[in-house]
Amino acid sequence: ISLSSLLEKRPEEQDQPVTVFRDANELRQKIADDNMLISPLFPYDPMVAFEYFEITVPPGYDRLSVPHKRGVIEYITVFDGEMEVLSEDTWHRLEKGQSLRFQADRPHGYRNLSDRPAVALNVINYPGRK
Ligand code: MN
């Protein structure tokens, strides 16, 4: 299941416009009891097999993620603040402008040890999925 399917209904595939404007300021929300804010800028689209989020990671956030299905890859680019991403048993520190690509079909996680929110782009690619 894609993350964005939890956040909103999938648009009707046949009427997808070619050019789509989305505003993260209008879309930020929490899922369940997790206090990360997620803005589903471009929900999962089978044509491209990825979903595209802005995430806001609050200070003190520290969470391991359940591995996704085999082959899933995540990309993170930090736009503001700093955060750390766990991959292959190492926490990788990312500052503004820095990015990480990692295999998300194994244990991974996100944390923010700083005293202000980190804002990042998160792309989740589901290769081979329809
Ligand atoms: Mn993940």
Image (tube, rainbow, N blue to C red):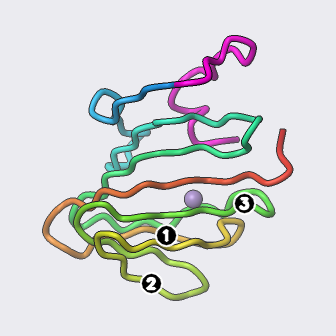
Identity of the residue furthest to the bottom in this view: 90
Q: Are marks 3 and 1 in contact (CB under 8 Å)?
A: no
Judged left or right of residue 57, residue 101 is: right
Instruction: Identify the secondary structure beneath mark 1.
Output: strand
Q: Distance between the residues labelled 3 and 1?
A: 14 Å
Mark in the foreground, 3 or 1: 3
4 displayed left or right of 83: right
Q: Residue at x 50, y 67 (%)?
A: 64
Give the quadrant of the N terminus: top right
Q: What element carries label 2?
A: strand
Give whichever of discs 2 and 1 has the lower sequence position. Answer: 2
Above or below, 107 against 69 in this view is below
Q: Which amino acid does label 1 sit on?
A: Gly
Q: Which quarter of the figure is the C terminus placed in?
A: top right
Q: Residues within 10 Å of mark 2 (few under 14, many from 20)?
A: some
Q: Residue 72 carries which label?
A: 3
Ligand 1 under 8 Å from disc 1 Cβ: no
Distance, label 2 to label 1, CA atoms, is 8 Å
Can residue 15 be found in the magenta stretch? yes
Three-letter code, disc 3: Val
- Left or right of 91: which side holds 16? right
Q: Position of residue 90 (x, y in %)?
A: 51, 88
Q: Which residue position is annotated with label 2? A: 91
Quadrant where ligand 1 appears:
bottom right
Q: What stretch is highlighted in magenta?
A: 1-19
Inter-mark Cα distance, 3 to 2: 19 Å
- Residue pointed to by mark 1: 109
